[in-house]
Amino acid sequence: MGSDFEERSGKSFASQWRAATAFIKRYPFSPLAHAVLIFLIAATVYWLRRRLRKFAQDEPDLQRAAPIFDLPVSAAFVLSLLIVPSVYPQAPRLIQAVLGAAALFPTILILRRLLEPKLFPILHALVVIYFVSQLRLLTASLPVLSRLLFLAEMLGCFLFLLWLVRSGHLMTSAAETSVRFSRAIRVISTIGLLVFPAAFLSNLLGYVNLGNLLGVFYLRSVFLAAMLYAVIRILEGLLILALHLWPLGSLRVVRLHREMLHRRTCHAFEFLAFLFWLDRTLDFFGLIAPIVDGVKAALSANLVIGSLSLSVGQVLAFLIAVWGSFLVSKFLRFVLEEDVYQHFKLARGIPYAISTMLHYAILLLGFFIGLGALGIDLSKIAILAGAFSVGVGFGLQNVINNFVSGLILLFERPIKVGDVIEVGGVGGEVRRIGIRASVIRATDGSEVIVPNGSLISGQVTNWTFSDRERAVEVSVSIARDADPQRVMELLKATAASHPGVAKAPSPQVYAVSFAAGATTFQLRAWTDRYQDWAQLRSDLALAVNDALAREKIALA
């Protein structure tokens, strides 16, 4: 690796020019394709900028993305860097230097729009350091001059970072930037304060290749990180605009969860940028091919379990397929529940049944895909499952019964999520219908897990099966000398005046029993606040007691 680095750095300018000329002759359309791509991206960004101005006044998020669209050509050039490796395959050093120099200025212009002025010295230093680095590479055929430039470059970088840290620019800017970004700048600066002296001393003491490797690697990483940061911010601006415009902006799920979608997508951009940075870094050290070969060898290693032989790659593919099915199911259910179901007037419980069955179907599909990735013949699995089902039928009959009962609950829907039921002396609201059991939240706050088989085979009282209304009954015993008709009218009027009692059906009062010294009446009222029926019954009982007391009607 060290000799390769020395060989690449020691090429004369004439040899680099010849390599660049030969590359252009071999790929004559690469610059044209690059220019066309930049033009198309710039035209798109310019068109989006005109759309942005219509909404930016009312949306703070769009105002934050506006600086990106003020520089359409620069944004297009920086975004085009993502496809440079495919447009310029194995480009020689001189071509890479020209592309880097051409990309540096648009990157600096964009970063000047995104960063506060206190961080501008970093941008100016990057420009100076980049051109000094390119000058040093072009004078590599003159070892003494190249070495002096390297020492001056390392010393200058160290003094600049020392001034930057001691001046307090990083600390004062932290309040104006995101915590992660300011922390990243401080970490990079701290690493530079260690790398630059090490590279300077190594070169000075005669370890030229080691010093050059440390210094060049650090600077290359910083330049690439700055460009990737600009790319991420450009993509973030495009994302913000896309989440406000048609068609994404018209979706209910986007309107309700715009901030969450923005945050998670930006995290995905940052992760992909890190992978790109890691790929370029490993390529700089010439480690990609060895790492790829090592990974292939590790994934090809066999795991022998009895007569079954599986590779690590197959096991990993199985796990990825199952994990991916969970993610796909979660995403699809999220979209259905937050957006699609809202456009249809579905009966209560149907959305939950659809989401649950979709979840099971996707998991089953992912499981079979994983089995295929393991290299297992699915026809043999079917034969094995048929033989195995006999034993399972006896050993797991309760589990299978509960599973089938769960499917019946989802399809027939005698009980739905949100229903208030009573089963086995336990009453409460159904919170979840699972694959084996359902969860009922009791009135005392506890959660009772009831097997699905009990909900199908046992007697269940469903208070909200056909509607959400519930009867509330209050019994009262009155002395025999009171006028029964007067008492009944008083009880009806008391119940009708309560705000929690439904107007239809109207409250009713019944005389249910007569004794020697008392007459018992039963007040029945209806409420659509089924979850508060116990509180309503208590309120009605107190209201009836007060009304009887005002009318001086004695209780028995």
Image: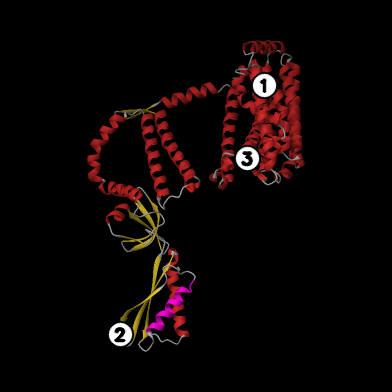
x and y percentages locating residue 419 in the rendered image: 39, 58
In-front residue for pair 480/126: 480
On residue 515, the disc is: 2
> Where does the C terminus fall, quadrant-wise?
bottom left
Camera-side mark, 1 or 2: 2
Q: Which mark identifies residue 240? A: 3
Over which residues does the magenta segment extend? 484-498
Give the residue at x 76% y 21%: 148
Where is 153 relative to 56, above or below?
above
Q: Position of residue 510 (x, y in %)?
A: 35, 77
Tell me the quarter of the image containing the N terminus.
top right
Q: CA distance from mark 3 to mark 2?
A: 77 Å
**From this viewpoint, is residue 306 visible?**
no
Front position in the image: 217 or 551: 551
Residue at (66% x, 40% y) in the render: 181
Q: Is residue 247 magenta?
A: no
Q: Which residue is mark 1?
A: 35
Q: Is the residue marked by circle 2 packed among few (<14), some (14-19), or many (20+) residues within 10 Å?
A: few
